[in-house]
Structures are given as C-alpha cells and as structure tokens.
Image: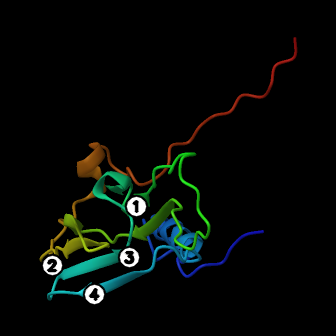
Amino acid sequence: MARITGFNSPLFLGFDHLEQMLDRVSKTSAEGYPPYNIEQTGEYSLRITLAVAGFSMDNLQVTVEDNQLVVRGRMEDDGPDRVYLHRGIASRQFHRSFVLAEGIDINGASLDSGLLHIDLEQHIPEPEVRTIKIIKAEAVTGKKNAARPKEIDIAPDCED
C-alpha cells in the first residue's frame, strides 16, 4: 500500500528525507519519559530541558546522529546488597530523540539540579539568488541537433 504524503508532488525535488524525518518524529512522540521542555531563549536560540533526577553526568549521553539529537540515560544497578521496602523512584533507562532541522547546531549541554539543559542555535543562511546562463545545446556537446536522440539500428535475432 503506497502512502500519500504532501511531498509526492513533482514540484518538490529532493525532499524525500523530510518524509523519513516525519516518520521518525511520529515514532518518538509516544515516549513519555523523561518529561522535557523546549523554550526559545533568543531570536535564533533554543533550549531543551529534560528532567533527569537521579542521573549523574556519567549516566547520560547526548549525541547527534543523522540530524537527530539523541539523549540516552542509563542508571547503574543498585546491586543485591540494597533491599527496598518500597521502590517508587524509577531508575529505568531512557532514550529520547529530537529531529533537528538543517542549520541547527548544539552549543552545549549542562546538568543542574536534576535538569539536563541542551542549548541549540539555528543558523539562518542568507538568501542566495543565482542567475543560470542559458547556452545552446550544440555548445555543450559540440554537435548540431544534440537534443535529438540518436537512431539505433536493432538487428533481428539470428537463428543458429
């Protein structure tokens, strides 16, 4: 079954990766742990804050993989010497992903009072206008009527 998306128009050239990014976003949006905030801290800057109480810097990893910001957390096992009468604080591992647009850079990450802050900055490229010179087709190939396809003679199959 073929999926119909807004990017199947012949006028959208080279936007195939956007559909893949939308698929990734829809798969990761069901995650609920850890909770996070996204705030705009400047005209072109953002901050993602994740609530990672109980995790130390050694338990956290922040990476960028193929235009995707990935935050992973893994708690160390308490070992058999700890006996809990009630365990209400989760110490589970997590994997949280954010799809990044082109031109977004990670400025850094910091851990403060159980909150992991990741600072991002968007670089807006200057609009570029280029004029493409139009030349005659014969100048490209060096032959007249270069736009006309070559005629090919096809010999009938010979019987042995």
Q: Mark 4 points at which residue?
A: 39
- Residue 15 image point, x, y percent: 44, 69
The quadrant in which residue 142 appears is top left
Hey, what amino acid is under mark 4? Glu
Q: Are the residues at dot 2 and dot 3 in contact (C-beta closer than 8 Å)?
A: no
Disc 3 versus disc 4: distance between alpha carbons?
14 Å
Q: In this view, does 152 lie above or below 80?
A: above
Q: Is residue 135 above or below residue 50?
A: above
- Residue 150 image point, x, y percent: 50, 43
Which sits in the foreground, 37 or 113?
A: 113
The figure's colour scheme reads rainbow
Q: Closer to the N terminus: mark 1 or mark 4?
A: 4
Q: Closer to the N terminus: mark 3 or mark 1?
A: 3
Q: Which residue is drawn at 58% across and 69% down?
A: 87
- Residue 26 image point, x, y percent: 57, 75
Disc 2 versus disc 4: distance between alpha carbons?
26 Å
Residue 63 in the figure: left or right of residue 110: right
Which sits in the foreground, 134 or 53?
A: 53
Q: Mark 3 points at which residue?
A: 51
Q: Residues within 10 Å of mark 4 (few under 14, many from 20)?
A: few
Q: Closer to the N terminus: mark 3 or mark 4?
A: 4
Q: Is residue 41 above or below residue 68?
A: below
Q: Name the residue under label 2.
A: 127
Q: Closer to the N terminus: mark 2 or mark 4?
A: 4
- Residue 92 image point, x, y percent: 54, 62
Secondary structure found at label 4: strand
Q: Which residue is drawn at 82% across and 19% down?
A: 158
Quadrant in which the C terminus is drawn: top right
